[in-house]
Image (cartoon, helix red, strand yellow):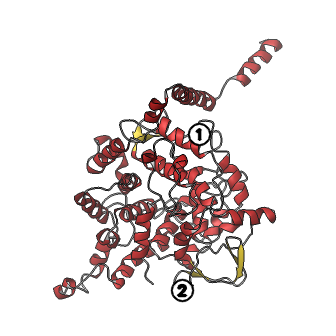
Amino acid sequence: MSSAESANHNSMTAAAPTKTQQEQWVVDNQVFQIFDLFANLPRNAKSALVELQRDNHLEYLTKGLKRLDPSFCVLDANRPWLCYWILHSIALLGDYVEHEVENNVVDFLSRCQDPNGGYGGGPGQLPHLATTYAAVNALITVGGDRSLSSINRWSVMFEVSHFFCNSAYWSHFEPNDMDFKIFCREKVYMFLKRMKQPSGAFRMHDAGEIDVRACYTAISVASVLNILDDELIQNVGDYILSCQTYEGGISGEPGAEAHGGYTFCGFATMILINEVNRLDLAGLLDWVAFRQGREGGFQGRTNKLVDSCYSFWQGGAFALLQRLHAILDEQLANFGPQTGVASDISGGEGSSDGTQVDDKTCHSKLGGTNASCPVNLNSIGYNFVKQPGEMEALYHRWSLQQYILLCAQDMKGGLKDKPGKHRDFYHTCYSLSGLSLSQHSWSQDEDTPPLPNAVMGPYANLLERTHPLFNVVLDQYYEAHEFFDTP
């Protein structure tokens, strides 16, 4: 090959598009064809296209909760997740399932419990932090005493039946009794402790992987069940800090690439353990802001394709940042994260359980200071959502809603990743969760409904509000918080 031919060959090789570029062009073409069609429609036709197909979504979800196609056998180890994705989606749509179905869900998840704590992916399967998180969130979503008191109920009965075999005792037993609830949750607590690692992180299961996802699922479950304490949170913040990358996002483990799912998990965990000040919030904001693409949806990583599930994972990070404006301003004023400084957004009095006191740090209450104040860890999730949004979300909420409604919505029911993909329960759950956060991000507080101009399409598109830390509908969260609010 001559030098001229070699140079020409190298030039052509250098100009060849990558596979990622080719896939991006395909997505751009599909998305903007939809947008162009929408832009040229008459007003009444536009309204129909951006209407949330509520009835069709409910039909799709309800059928999935009762019976699944044989192809779902590949998700046999994810059955609590299927319960959560479907139930949470139904709750976001403002509906509920029949009483018989609720009871079936509670009974099934009870069979997924391990005698020594935690939930497996199905009956008899290994307990796993991810499926424990999904099962607990599903039971909170069902709500009611039977559902909430079922958490580890059967394992407790298995363990202590030889102590309480007297029928007279059980005839007077109430599953709401304080001693019983504490004992039930103690099983979950022991499972979480078994997963705790010297580094501060958690394993997903016995001999399983260690990552930020495990930290979030463990801390979220502990917080919502009111069993979070200093022992569980020890060194968790150090591990998550080691996963914040030079880009500003958070990776699954040290040295890996920043990712939307792990960024939300790490960010939410740092809030729940009262150490969010230690993160580089300005860098995190910068990274997540650039994850919204021209399609209006979010990508999970740099140079990746848009995916509707990141409507929650990335959109949720913005929902958290909205309530941390004072801390973000303080960091910017001081040119960086406040290493070793905790953010006291817990409120209330400290207690012997779940109380964090550090005489060497100054706890900032959303910007203010109060040295050595006690922190009730288990009240952080409750008080955080009570905090008013201090700033508008720093992403294009209208564009995100447009992407979800026009490009991710299957008009026959369910939502999907992007045009050309098939609907599924996972993307339905997280697309609707992100849509809810976007709609309610205009509200100053939880009691103020969004204005009509905050909701794309008819106002009937408005979804129920979800808790930005736990991703359960707020009313269900409050019920669980009250139920588990015991010493």
What residue is rendered at 21% in x and 83% in y? 170
Question: Which is nearer the N-term, disc 2 or disc 1?
Answer: 1
Q: Is residue 388 left or right of residue 169?
A: right
Instruction: Judge whether residue 83 can be spotted in this image.
Output: yes
User: What mark, if any, has residue 351 been given in the picture?
Assistant: 2
Q: Position of residue 403 (x, y in %)?
A: 53, 38
Q: Residue at x 74, y 70 (%)?
A: 339
> 392 left or right of 463?
right
Q: Quadrant of the N terminus?
A: top right
- Residue 333: name its quadrant: bottom right
Q: Which residue is mark 1?
A: 296
- Three-letter code, disc 2: Ser
Q: Secondary structure at mark 1?
A: loop
Q: Nearer the viewer, mark 2 or mark 1?
A: 1
Residue 163: name its quadrant: bottom left
Tell me residue 300's x, y (percent): 59, 45
Q: Nearer the viewer, residue 27 or 445?
A: 445
Mark 2: give few (<14), some (14-19) or many (20+) Cα within 10 Å: few
Which numbered tag is attached to residue 35?
none
Badge 2 vs badge 1, beta-carbon distance below 8 Å: no
Label 2: which secondary element:
loop
What's under tag 1, amino acid-wise? Gly
57 or 255: nearer the eye? 57
Q: Calculate the distance from the C-alpha at mark 2 to the C-alpha at mark 1.
A: 45 Å
